[in-house]
Image (spheres, coloured by chain):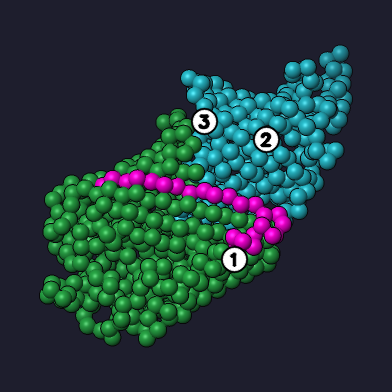
Amino acid sequence: MKIPLNPPLTKGDKKKQKPRIPPLLKGGRGDLTCLLSFFLIIVFLSPLLANAAETWSGYFAVEGRYFLNDPIHPGQRAQQASIAGQPEFYREWETTSFTVAPFFRIDSADNERSHFDLRELFVLWYPGDFELGIGVRKIFWGVTESQHLVDIINQTDLVELPDGEEKLGQPMINLSILKDWGTLDFFILPYFRERTFPGRKGRLRGTLFVDTDQSRFESGAENHHLDAAIRYSHSLGDWDIGLSHFKGTSREPTFLLEPDSAGNPTLIPLYEQIDQSGIDLQSIIDVWLLKLELIHRSGQGASFQAWTTGFEYTFTGIFGSKADLGAIGEWLHDSRSEKTTPFEDDLMLGLRLALNDMDSTEILLGVIQDLDAASKMISVEGVRRFGDHWKLEVEALIFVQQDQSDLLFTQRDDDFFQLTLAYYF
Amino acid sequence: MKRLVLLLLPLWFVPTISFAETPEEKGLKIAKEVNLRDDGYGDFTASLKMTLRNRQGEESIRVIRNRTFEVPGDGDKVLIIFDTPKVVKGTAFLSFTHKIKNDDQWLFLPALKRVKRISSSNKSGSFMGSEYAYEDISSQEVEKYSYRWLRDEDYEGKAAFVLELDPTDPNSGYTRQIVWFDQKEYIPIKVDYYDRKNVLLKTLNFHGYKQYLGKHWRPDRMAMVNHQTGKSSDLEWSGYKFKTGLSEKDFTKNSLKRAR
């Protein structure tokens, strides 16, 4: 289910100015050299080891976006086109694997959306009772569909899609201990990735431009602060449970409202030090999936709780056909105010129709309704395959009656329709 | 005379009750033997090519790999990795099948790196858009059906037991299955599936059985035809390997995430 994340509004003055720290691989030469030599060592050493198997896979895509309304800000356009790709190299030996997956996008309208990221570059060792992963990885935690509160290891690549489902690669050392009583994961996260935001000419950016070149940090170590996380997860019969704690740099920034050099008000992301505990639970009762994600966070002003809870139900073989229809309902609650989060008290209803035909056609419809106002957001998504290699995706996002008090008000004129054609290999 | 008949009647019935099998008992005995004969394979891996065909003869191909682990006293653990279509490459499916309670199933979605628990109550749902339902490919345990022997007959030159299997689970998409078992090797050679309205829905034929480790019979091809839609799905198995050294540790959520 797709949901736009949005820059929460200002929080006021705080903390010290940071000098510009270049994001990973953009200019941090030390980091880049280190990663490249790591890659080269693996590639050159790998043929020396026996039993190696390697594969290339991935995709390249062209995407067109059309916005239904005139833009609010100067320089913004009604159309946007881009190309993107993510090739992946994988090699495995007896109990070790190596993965590298770079990602790029070149965008016609938004120079912040034109970006490169190393989604994955890691070695995984799995001798049996534990797994050790070192490098840049992507880790997912959680069970709900509308938003992923508990999922905190990776930063959101917000310029990709407003729903926040795309993530940036995160450098880490991850030790997983696999026991009969569950899995215990330890994470050391030595480098922090800043969230990406649309540029001045990009759409879906809200009223105020987010100046990522001026990002600030609570910690003096800035994006080299050593973050850490621990997670316990287990499947017990019809229950799946996860308990987690994160200590370090908040992936979600707060914003400082300050004038830029020309005197225009801009938002400056501030990344504070937080503690976040999370619970994710899923239970299966016959055809029902019942879900809960709950977090408690401190370190960004007053501590707060947020949760998503709901269900998923699937009707199999509707109308005597092979098609399955899934219904999803989730309640999103956040104890912060509507000025800080778009989902302080909202209801998400979704329908997912999988035709189970030869072309794997699927249609998703989602509505998020603010329970305290008329604001709602509708997303429609259709996907089908053409042969083995091609995938066509149609997506539309519509903001209806956004209330002035709602955080998504600033995106009221950013309704869009998007077409993506991707080639997979 | 009448009195004599009445006296004789109980005597005449006694042997029937205590010695002759009912069709239900005979059916259950055959099903147990089928299961027993394949016991002890430990684990196996194989590649599968699935060809979907519609009424117009258009084809679509899926290539998957299968790893199966035998759990003594319970259903198998199965890990399936999708290679083709390339669009879904990297997707993987983990299933802990059980004798009586619902299977535990997880799906790995590679784009999000997400492991999603799914409900196995939808066992009548289509597997990868094919004519196979999840319950057709799940491990066949004795406890999943009640049995009735119908008759013995020759099927394609082989002596066969013909059994009716009634699913014990109300979520099954079938009222009954009619199964032909080879009398010599106790392996299924044909299945007729009847839908919830008790109308013939599908027929599955097993072809090219080969014996592995001198004990375990596996088909090279399984052909499923849907009589109501004219669609069909062929499953071609290749590269069977038994006792490959897989352990239960290769069938966890973590191993699902790194399955390739």
Which residue appears at 28% of the width and 71% of the height? A212
Q: Which quarter of the figure has residue A196? A: bottom left
Mark 1: amino acid: Ile
CA–CA distance in space, label 2 to label 3: 17 Å
| Residue B218 vs residue A162, the one in the foreground | A162
The subunit letter for the residue under badge 2 reads B
| Residue A307 vs residue B10, the one in the foreground | A307
Residue A46: say if magenta.
Answer: yes
Residue that badge 2 annotates: B237
Residue A190: say if magenta.
Answer: no
Q: Which quarter of the figure has residue A324? A: top left
Residue that badge 1 annotates: A41
Mark 2: amino acid: Trp
| Residue A18 vs residue B27, the one in the foreground | A18
The vertical placement of B177 against B79, above or below, is: above
Q: Residues within 10 Å of mark 2 (few under 14, many from 20)?
A: many
The vertical placement of B196 against A97, above or below, is: above
Q: Is mark 1 on a helix, strand or loop?
A: helix
Display colour for chain B? cyan
Q: Is mark 2 on a helix, strand or loop?
A: strand
The subunit letter for the residue under badge 1 reads A
Tell me which segment is drawn in magenta: A42-65
